Structure formats: C-alpha cells, structure tokens
Amino acid sequence: MAHVDWKGALLELQKIVHDYGPKEIADDLGISVNSLYKQLDPNYNLEVNPLDPENPDGKPRYKLGFKTIFKICWITNNFKPVSMMLNAMERGIFTIPKNKDEGAGFLKLLSNADKESGEAFRATLGALENNKVSKEEALIGIKECDEAMGAWADLKAKYKAILID
C-alpha cells in the first residue's frame, strides 16, 4: 500500500483553516475552535490519538476523520489535502468547470470514457481474482476494453473537431 503523507495533509489543512477563518469553520462543523485545533494538530492526531486529560472515559474524542477533512475542504472550496491523500493512493480528483454549458459535450464524453474505463478496470480485476484469466473472462475484458477505447476515441474526435474549425 502506498504511503500517504497524513502529516503533510493535516498541515495543509491547518493552513487552509487558518486562511479561511477557524471560527467560521468550527461553527459550520458544530464544534468549538479548541476542538477544531486539536483535530488539526498532527502531533495529536497522527496514528494513535493520545489520551486527553479532559476526557474522563479515556476514549479519544478529537480524532479527525475523512468526512470532516472533506467537509472542511467543501466549506473552504480547497480540496488540496484530499487530493494529496488520493494522489498517494494513485487516485485523483478533478474540478468540473462552473460553466458547464459550453463544455457539456466534452464533459459528457469525458464522463462516458471514465465510466467505460472503470468497467474495463473492474472486469480485469475480476478476471485476476483467482490469478488465472479464463477464455470467458478474456472475451469480457476485450469487450470492455473496446468500449473504453471507443469512448476515448469519441472524446479525441471532439478535440480534433476544434482544430478543424
């Protein structure tokens, strides 16, 4: 499994919260600013959450979860920490343009290409489940790859049409 720089992501999140305004974010999250600061402290929140003297039952209360990270990113409209985590896991995020009308054709083609590529990906993973690809699985894989390549070719053709005009 890839190494995710949690500390780096938390430090980036701290910067975003500081720049945006910790009081506003804490209010949106329904927590105190003190609790928000504890959640964003990498020394407090990495790997094992140390016991909190203010916590009588000994259960960690300030552990920062992905949902909270995502919500902070949503509030601030800055998804860099999420992107840092996903990129380390060989995943990614992208931003859809605000003016969807002008790029609607491109976005529809991109979405279809992504969907078809995902189906080819899942078919391949399914075929490799037992470390041996059967003839039936190979035929399904070829079909899914053809559909994915066709979807990418449609997107490529849309780009080429721009060059011709």
Image (cartoon, grey):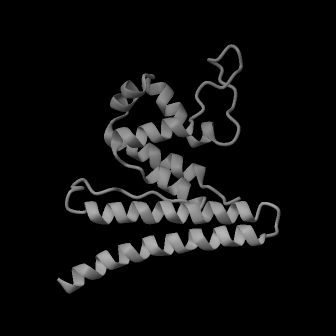
Question: Could you tell me residue 101's position as x and y percent?
Answer: 20, 57
The residue that appears at 36% across and 56% down in the rendered structure is 95
The residue that appears at 64% across and 17% down in the rendered structure is 55
From where the camera sits, is residue 40 visible?
Answer: no
From where the camera sits, is residue 142 visible?
Answer: yes
Tell whether 139 sits left or right of 7.
right
Q: Quadrant of the C terminus?
A: bottom left
Query: What residue occupies the far left of the structure in this picture?
Result: 165
Q: Is residue 144 above or below residue 55?
A: below
Question: Could you tell me residue 146's position as x and y percent?
Answer: 54, 74
Between 160 and 61, the one lying in front of the other is: 160
Query: What residue occupies the far top of the structure in this picture?
Result: 56
Between 16 and 91, the one lying in front of the other is: 91
Q: Give the image quarter of residue 93.
A: bottom left
Between 1 and 111, the one lying in front of the other is: 111
Tell whether 139 sits left or right of 101.
right
The residue that appears at 42% across and 38% down in the rendered structure is 72
Question: Could you tell me residue 116's position as x and y percent?
Answer: 50, 64
Question: Could you tell me residue 41's position as x and y percent?
Answer: 54, 39
Q: Quadrant of the N terminus?
A: bottom right
Q: Is residue 100 above or below residue 152?
A: above
Q: Give the image quarter of residue 33.
A: top left
The residue that appears at 54% across and 55% down in the rendered structure is 86
